[in-house]
Image (cartoon, rainbow, N blue to C red):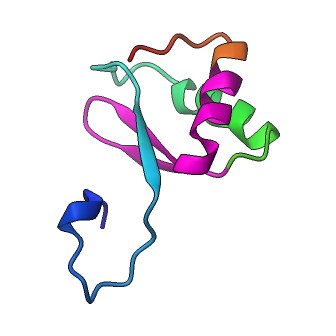
Amino acid sequence: MVCLEEAVPLEARCEKGWRCLKVAGPLDFSLSGILASLTAPLAASRIPLFAVSTYDTDYLLVKELDLNSAVSVLLKAGHALLR
């Protein structure tokens, strides 16, 4: 289950400290390779991630400690980031 940290019950086993990068969407189903173009440079830089795909877009969750590095890697790979 993925949810805001504040919504996690105290007794639940969870891993906190994730930050979310949202892929601008909606994405057409005919598109391919979008998630791979994002995850490949992060993997090459040894940045762990958790990907979530929805009906119209994708999300990349990276650990808070890796967020700045992940943003830098994605920018170097030619991706634009909006804040």
As drawn, 50 above or below 59: below
Tell how many labels: 0
> Quadrant of the image for the C terminus?
top left
Q: In the picture, residue 55 is in which quadrant?
A: top left
Closer to the camera, 23 or 71?
71
Residue 51 location (% of width, % of height)? 48, 47
Q: As drawn, is 31 to the left or to the right of 57?
A: right
Q: Residue at x 53, y 24 (%)?
A: 34
**Residue 76 to residue 54: above or below:** above
Q: Which residues are magenta?
A: 48-74
Q: Which quarter of the picture shows residue 69?
A: top right
Residue 20 against residue 80 in the figure, above or below: below
Residue 14, x across and y down, in percent: 40, 76
Quadrant in the picture for residue 71: top right
Q: Is residue 48 visible?
A: yes
Q: Furthest-bottom residue in view?
A: 11
Coordinates of residue 26 in the picture (x, y in percent): 27, 20
- The quadrant of the rendering that contains the N terminus is bottom left
Q: Is residue 54 magenta?
A: yes
Left or right of residue 46: residue 7: left
Q: Is residue 76 above or below residue 39?
A: above
User: Is residue 37 or residue 70 the one in the foreground?
Assistant: 70
Q: Residue at x 53, y 48 (%)?
A: 64
Specify whether residue 37 is painted magenta: no
Q: Does any portion of residue 49 appear in the rendered image?
A: no
Q: Residue at x 29, y 62 (%)?
A: 5
65 with respect to 43 (left or right): left
